[in-house]
């Protein structure tokens, strides 16, 4: 297991460009909130074929308020992009439902890019990683937000990601922005010939 500063992207706003470059066009975001990341991603990943936003819009941890306004804001953003859909459900329920349809053409081979930004508690991040990793395509990326924050908040994110990477002998790439994001290649690393993979 190794932790490396990303040689490819500077901040999370560059993930759509990385996905364009690697031809990763089937996307899941766990934890949509106001859909700021979704708007950025869908505006910059021009060939994105499918973008599924997963969020139950329930009160939890750091979000102890009625989340209906957040949901309506996200619906407004998602409505601008025909390839985008919101799944208003918990992460584990969405993954279970999507794994059940993995043989259909739309989902064949899994998802190319899964971005985890829901609850930042260690137990929840660990569960999200374990739940979504099997649904990431062989050449895909599992990523997430809030790897590190100056305040020290969300320390559970880093702990969960490091434990997973150590267990599976994978390299973690981190962005230098603040708060930073993390990402892991399903095949372990990009490799010299990844651009030729179709």
Image (cartoon, grey):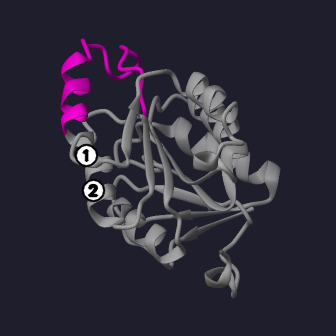
Q: Quadrant of residue 31?
A: top left
Q: What is the x, y in percent for residue 76?
A: 18, 36
Q: What is the x, y in percent for residue 44?
A: 30, 66
Residue at the image point whose x is 70% and y is 81% from the top: 191
Q: What is the x, y in percent for residue 20?
A: 44, 72
Residue at the image point whose x is 26% and y is 25% from the top: 71
Q: Residue under label 1, please give it.
A: 36
Q: What is the x, y in percent for residue 45?
A: 36, 65
117 or 120, which is in the foreground? 117
Residue at the image point whose x is 40% and y is 66% from the top: 47
Magenta span includes 75: yes
Residue 13 vertical placement versus 196 (above, below): above
Q: Quadrant of residue 100?
A: top right
The reply to whether the C-beta atoms of the residues labelled 1 and 2 are less than 8 Å apart is yes
Which quadrant of the figure contains the N terminus? bottom right
Which quadrant of the figure contains the C terminus? bottom right
Q: Position of 37 compared to 25: left or right?
A: left
Q: Residues within 10 Å of mark 1 (few under 14, many from 20)?
A: few
Q: Residue under label 2, please give it.
A: 40
Residue at the image point whose x is 25% and y is 13% from the top: 65
Q: Which residues are magenta?
A: 54-76
Magenta span includes 89: no
153 or 195, which is in the foreground? 195
Alpha-carbon span between mark 1 and mark 2:
6 Å
Residue 143 vertical placement versus 8 (above, below): above
21 or 63, which is in the foreground? 21
């Amino acid at each position: 297991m190794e932790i490396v500063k990303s040689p490819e992207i500077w901040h999370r706003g560059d993930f759509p460009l990385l996905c364009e470059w690697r031809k990763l066009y089937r996307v899941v975001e766990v934890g949509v909130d106001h859909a700021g990341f979704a708007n950025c991603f869908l505006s910059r990943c021009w060939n994105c074929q499918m973008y599924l936003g997963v969020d139950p819009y329930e009160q939890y941890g750091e979000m102890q308020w009625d989340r209906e306004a957040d949901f309506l804001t996200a619906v407004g953003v998602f409505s601008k992009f025909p390839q985008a859909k919101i799944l208003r459900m918990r992460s584990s329920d969405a993954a279970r439902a999507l794994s059940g349809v993995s043989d259909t053409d739309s989902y064949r081979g899994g998802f190319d890019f899964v971005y985890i930004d829901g609850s930042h508690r260690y137990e929840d991040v660990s569960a999200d990683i374990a739940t979504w990793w099997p649904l990431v395509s062989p050449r895909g990326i599992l990523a997430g937000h809030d790897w590190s924050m100056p305040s020290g908040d969300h320390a559970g994110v880093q702990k969960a990601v490091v434990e997973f990477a150590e267990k599976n002998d994978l390299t973690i790439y981190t962005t230098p922005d603040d708060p930073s994001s993390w990402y892991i290649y399903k095949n372990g690393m990009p490799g010299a010939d990844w651009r030729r993979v179709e």
